[in-house]
Amino acid sequence: MSVAGGVLPVAAAVALLVFAVRLANEPRRLGNAVWLGVALLLTALWLLRTALHLDWLTPVLSGLLAVVAVAVALVLPIALLFNGVRMWRREGHRAGNLLSLGLGLGLIVLEALFFVPLGRWGSALVAIAAVLACYFGFLFVSLLVYSVVYSRIGRRGGFDAIIVLGCGLDGDRVPPLLAGRLDRAIRLHRRETTPPLLVVSGGRGPGETVTEAEAMHHYLREHGVPEDLIRREDRARTTEENLRFSAALLPGDARQVVAVTSNYHVFRTAVECRRLGLPFHATGSPTARYFLPSALLREFAALILHYRRTTIAACVLIVGAGLLLTIFG
């Protein structure tokens, strides 16, 4: 076995061990996603290298890699474009709804530039942009995979209080996305032997005739939740305020608290809880499939902004290395 062949499985095992230790210590850390991504990437490279030494498997592997390459280069950008158009039509023309459309267009432009003669520096800049795209793609996939892991390891019961995060109203009406969160909270509430306190959180935003907390309170009452088990937090406008203001309404003996949000928002909510020093868990409700790509991209952007110093440092390192290779290569 070559040195590379021996190093890869060891490195993968070390990365997986670090991930497991960090997960056991604190599952609400963004770095856990990166370590899991590194472990999976190293494992995949090791398996790929091993498979390349098996003659009978080489044609199958080559075909599989070709399918993956086509999917990433062609299917993914086109799917993002279609999703962006659907979001534009169904969810409005807000900037946040254009993320999948913008990303799809960006990937198509980047891929097209590889076939345009741009000279040494132009080609170098395109290559740097491609490396940056791969870097952010790796982070996105790592976060997506870890978000699924986190959602599977959270507590299932034994809650003293449940916080429901608001997400906007249609006038004074609870829209489907928010109804999903409330229905999830109601199921958790009814599952407990001693029904926990429910805190509904959300202020009044543009185009809303009542506060989100008031509309959610009304929804819970219509679904049979007793008045004395509901508290309203009606000032919050951000996830941070949802959590911070709601925490102030909890009774002193509330030890196990869960924040209910949409499934795409679960991990960022958990990260925010940790950042605020709140020992809360997070759980999610289902989301319409067409809504997920843009929603996940928004969550990814928000998490990257949380760690903007690290992101800027990584981008500077990639760009700097690319420029140095171009100058001295």
Image (cartoon, helix red, strand yellow):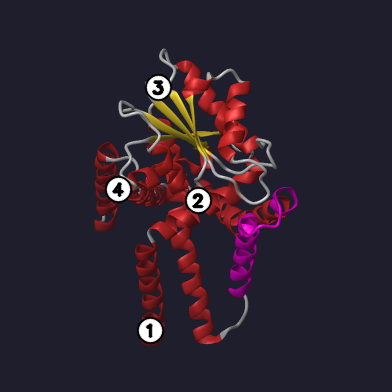
Q: Which residue is mark 3?
A: 157
- Whole-angstrom CA distance, mark 4 to mark 2, is 28 Å
Instruction: Report the magenta residues as a range.
Output: 87-114
- Whole-angstrom CA distance, mark 4 to mark 1, is 31 Å
- Whole-angstrom CA distance, mark 1 to mark 3, is 59 Å
Marked residue nearer the N-terminal end (4 or 1): 4
Q: Is residue 55 visible?
A: no
- Residue at 50% x, 78% y is 125
Mark 4 packing: few (<14 Cα in 10 Å), some, or many (20+)? many
Q: Amino acid at mark 1?
A: Gly
Dominant secondary structure, magenta: helix
Q: Which mark is residue 299?
A: 2
Marked residue nearer the N-terminal end (4 or 3): 4
Q: Is residue 299 left or right of residue 313?
A: right
Q: Amino acid at mark 4?
A: Ala
Is 83 in the magenta? no
Screen quadrant of the C terminus: bottom left
- Residue at 66% x, 59% y is 101
Is residue 118 or residue 96 the one in the foreground? 96
Q: Position of residue 23 (x, y in %)?
A: 30, 40
Q: Which residue is mark 4?
A: 12
* Pair 4/2: label in front: 2
